[in-house]
Amino acid sequence: MAIITRIPSHRLRLSLLGLTLVAAPGFAEETKDWQISPSLQLGVDYSDNLNLAASDQTETFFGTLTPGISINRQGRYLQLGLDYNLALVDYSSETRSDSYFHRLNAFADAELVEDHLFVNTQAGASQQLIDNRSAGNIDPRLSPDAFTNTFSFTITPSWRQRIGDYTDINLSAGYDAVIYQNGAEDSEGVSYSLSFDTRANPNKIYWTLQTRKDNAKSSNSNSTLEKNDFAQLQLGYRHSQQLDLRVGGGYSDSYIDNPTDTNIASGTSFWSAGLSWNPSPRTSLDLNYSNKLQSASRGAVLTHRRKRGTLSLSYQQNLSSVRQEQLQNVSPGRDQQLIDFIGNNTSLNEGRFISEALKANYNYSFRKSSLSLELSSQSRKFQDLSNRVEEDVGVNVGWSLQLSARSSMDISYDWSVLEPNTNAVSLARDYRSGVNLGMNRKLSPDTALALYIRYNEQRSDEVSRQFEEYGSGASISHSF
C-alpha cells in the first residue's frame, strides 16, 4: 500500500505549534502533569457502492489503519491538548487508489508573564467538502475525490493590563493560515485588536471599547481575500443579577465592492443592542443585534435545563467565509470514528457569504439511555457576482444505551434536503438520509471493539446524482 502525502507549503509557519509543544516541558513543574497516550486502530469495512455512483456500482472491502496520539497537560502556566490521527485506507477494488486523511485538534495556552503576557495557539486538520452538491457528503472514505485535506493554524500573543481598579486593557496580534491539499488557494492572515473593559467594576453601569483590524491574502497570488476594520463603543447597565442590558455603536468596513446585500457594513457607522437574561438558574437568554451585518452581528440563544433534559434554541446571522469557518471549527478528536456522518457544509468557495443559521437541540437522559434531537436550517448567500445561494434543512435523531459497564450501543438517523442553488446551472433539489447503528465493547481498560452497519441514500431531481449505499465494518483500538 503506497501512501503519498503532499507536504504543505506552510510547514515552517505551522511548525510554530511544534515549537510551542517542544518548549512546553519547560513549563512543567512535575512530569505527572503530562498525559501522553499513543493509540492504534484497525478497521475493516464493506461497501456495495464505492464512489457513491448512480449506476455501475462498485463493491469493495477496505481496511483502515489509524495510528494516533493524544497529549494533554493542565498546569498553572500551560494548558495543552493534542489529538491527532492519520487514517490510511487500502481499497481492495482496483478502481480506487489508496487514500489518507489527517485529523488534528490541538491547542496550547501559555502564560509567559504572570497575569500579563499570554500566547494562545490552535491547529486543526480535517476534510473539507469541495462541492456541497457532491455525492460525497457522507464519509470521505467512500468518495475521497469529493474532499480535500485541510489544515488550519492560529497563534495569538496578547498583553493584558489593569489600569486603576477596574479598567482592563487587552492588546493582541494574531497570525493564521489555512492550507488546502487541493481545490482552493492557500491563505494567511494577520489581525490586530485593542480593547478596554470596565465590567469588573461593582457599579450598575459599565462600558467597553473594541477595535480590530483583519487582513487575509492568498499565499499564491498575494491578492486580498478578506479585509475588515471594526470599532465599537458599548454601554452596559446591570439592572439586576439576572438582567444585563447593552447598547452601543461604531464603525465597520468589510471592503466588499458592490455587495449583494445592502445591510453589510461597508465603510459605514452602525448601532447595536443586546441583553443577557437569566430568569432562573436553569434558564438563560442572550440577544445581540446590529443594524449592519459584520463578522458577529445578530443572534439569539435560549437555553433551558431540566433534571433530565436540556433544550437550546439558537439563531445566528453574520458575514463569514469558508476560510473563517475552517479557523473556527473544531476537528474531530482521536476517539471519534471516521464513519461519522458529515453535517451540512458549504462548498469550497473563496467568496464571502452571509450565513443565517437556525438550530434547535434537545437532549434527554434517563437511567442508562440518552436521546438527542437536532433540527437545523441554514442558508449561505454569497456576496460575489454569482449571487449564488445555498440552502439546506436537516434533522438528526440519536439514541444511545449503556448495556453494561463495558458495552454500549447507539443508533442515529439523519435527513436533510438541499434546496436548488439560486442562479446555478442546475436547479435540482437533493434529499439525503442515512441510518447508522453501532455497538462498542471495552475488552480491557485500554482496548475497545466497535461494530457498525450503515445505510445512506440520496434522491435528487437530477437522476445522475442519486445513489444508495449499504455498508458495515469493525474496528479495534488500543491506547498504549
Image (tube, rainbow, N blue to C red):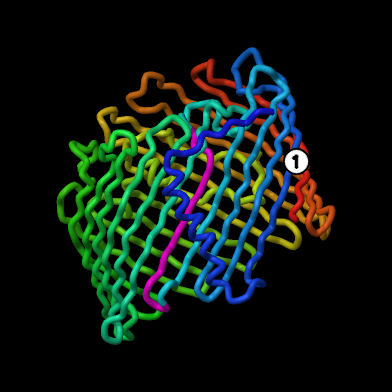
Which residue position holds label 1?
42
Is 446 part of what is drawn in magenta?
A: no
Q: Toward the viewer: 316 or 164?
A: 164
User: Which x, y percent locates residue 289?
Assistant: 29, 58
Secondary structure of the residue carrying numbered label 1: strand
User: Which x, y percent locates residue 339?
Assistant: 66, 39
Is 120 part of what is drawn in magenta?
A: yes
Q: Toward the viewer: 152 or 268?
A: 152
Furthest-left residue in this view: 268
- The residue depicted at 51 percent of the width and 51 percent of the height is 330
Residue 423, quarter of picture: top left
User: Which x, y percent locates residue 191?
Assistant: 30, 55
Quadrant of image for the N terminus: top right
Decide if residue 30 is on the left or right side of residue 167.
right
The residues colored magenta run 114-129
User: Which x, y percent locates residue 440?
Assistant: 77, 49
Examine the rendering and report whether any part of residue 358 can be seen.
Answer: no
Residue 433, quarter of picture: top right
Number of labels in the image equals 1
